[in-house]
Amino acid sequence: MLMITRMIIVTVPKEKAAEAERIWKTHCAPVMIQQPGCLSEQFLRSRDNPGEMISLQTWQDQKSIDQYRSGPGHQEILKHTRGLLGVSKVDVKNYEVVG
């Protein structure tokens, strides 16, 4: 069974960057790290593009991600980020940890 690194790349207008960071740190990250199978979560802010951020997560397996996405934790995060969805671009990428 391979661990999975998941990158959620979010780009918001630079005037919304502080709000997006605050929402993630205070509401989303605490929910994410409590999800069964979520081994780690880091929030990265681009030094080159002030509106680009990445939630970098390591998951035990795909089953854990699927359970999170269909459960109340994912709904809780969506509730907090809904206000930014109209002004942000979100790209989710999943990678197997092979070394």
Image (spheres, grey):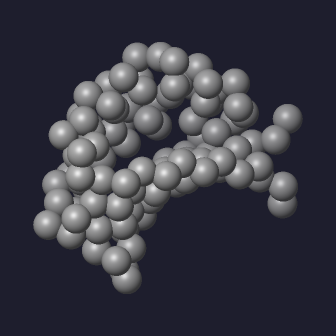
Residue 44 rendering spot, x and y as whole percentages = 42, 64
Left or right placement of residue 12 versus residue 4 in this view: left
The residue under the point 84% across, 60% down is 99
Q: Which residue is situated farthest in the top direction here?
A: 71
Residue that appears at 46% across and 30% down: 34
Q: Nearer the viewer, residue 99 or 72?
A: 72
Q: What residue is shown at x 42% (from left), y 26% (from top)?
A: 74
Residue 66 % position (x, y): 61, 24
Query: Furthest-bottom residue in view?
Result: 48
Q: Quadrant of residue 51?
A: bottom left
Q: Reply above or below: 51 against 43.
A: below
Picture coordinates of residue 4, whole percent (x, y):
70, 44
Asked whether, in this view, residue 70 is left or right of residue 43, the answer is right
Task: Locate the N terminus by quadrant.
Answer: top right
Snapshot quadrant of residue 17: bottom left
Q: Nearer the viewer, residue 49 or 5?
A: 49
Residue 71 x %, y %: 47, 16
| Count of numbered circles in the view | 0
Whether 59 is drawn above or below 10: the answer is above
Q: Is residue 81 visible?
A: yes
The residue located at (65%, 48%) in the rendering is: 94
Residue 26 at least partly seen: no
Location of residue 47 (image quadrant): bottom left
